[in-house]
Amino acid sequence: DVFCAKYTHFVLNKCHIADFDSCYIWQGCRKTSYGHICYTYRSNIDGLVTKIKKTTHSHRLIFACTFRCLYLLDSSFSHVQVSHLCHNSLCANPTHLTLESDAENKKRNQCKKHGICVMAHHPGQEPCIF
């Protein structure tokens, strides 16, 4: 779809990419320690087309577009985390991202704290990338 093609291209062009497997480091706007992006889409409600501007984290947008789960951009899904397996908050490499609950995301942060992937913190989930 046009929206995903446009914003995937935009996000990737704002990243420093050393190689396919590495972190894609967001070089654009930052809010706290995360990449931040504004995007626009058209809403069609009852035949009335409206242009809507929203903001989100760059890694959340690239994940939603890559895996075609645009519902993640809706604020009612803010409880679902797009978590960094690599623990790099500026990374926008879709292969370094996974969906998980806020509770799982907090458990995963224990791996970062210890510097190793402690799978007991998140059984059945993707392992961390160090």
Image (cartoon, rainbow, N blue to C red):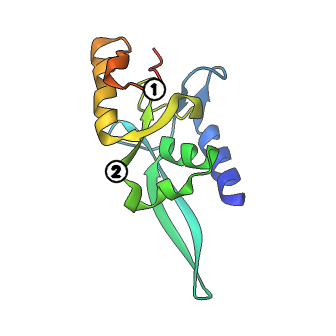
Determine the residue located farthest toward the front in the rendered image: 124
Q: Nearer the viewer, residue 121 or 85?
A: 121
Q: Which residue is mark 1?
A: 85
Q: Is residue 75 left or right of residue 65?
A: left
How far apart in space, not on screen, are marks 2 and 1 (Cα)? 18 Å
Q: Quadrant of the C terminus?
A: top left
Please state if 20 lies on the left or on the right of 23 as rendered.
Answer: right
Q: Identify the secondary structure beneath mark 2.
A: loop
Query: 10 Å neighbourhood of mark 1: few (<14), some, or many (≥20)?
Result: many
Residue at 59% in and 28% down: 16
x then y, percent, for residue 50: 56, 79
Q: Amino acid at mark 2?
A: His
Instruction: Tell which circle, 2 or 1, labels the residue nearer the N-terminal end.
Output: 2
Residue 106, given in percent of the width and then of the height, sits at: 28, 32
Q: Say left or right for 99 vs 79.
A: right
Position of 44 with respect to 88 (left or right) is right
Residue at image location 72% in from the left, 58% down from the top: 1
Looking at the image, is 126 positioned above or below residue 101? Answer: above
Give coordinates of residue 26: x percent, y percent.
Answer: 51, 35
Instruction: Please name whichever residue, 52 or 119, is drawn nearer the observer in this view of the structure.
Output: 119
**Corner quadrant of residue 17:** top right
- Residue 70, label in figure: none
Q: Please report contact status of discs 2 and 1: CB closer than 8 Å, yes or no.
A: no
Q: Which residue is mark 2?
A: 79
Q: Which one is in front, 24 or 30?
A: 24
Name the element at disc 1: loop
Q: Is residue 38 above or below residue 25?
A: below
Residue type at numbered disc 1: Leu
Q: Nearer the viewer, residue 40 or 95?
A: 95
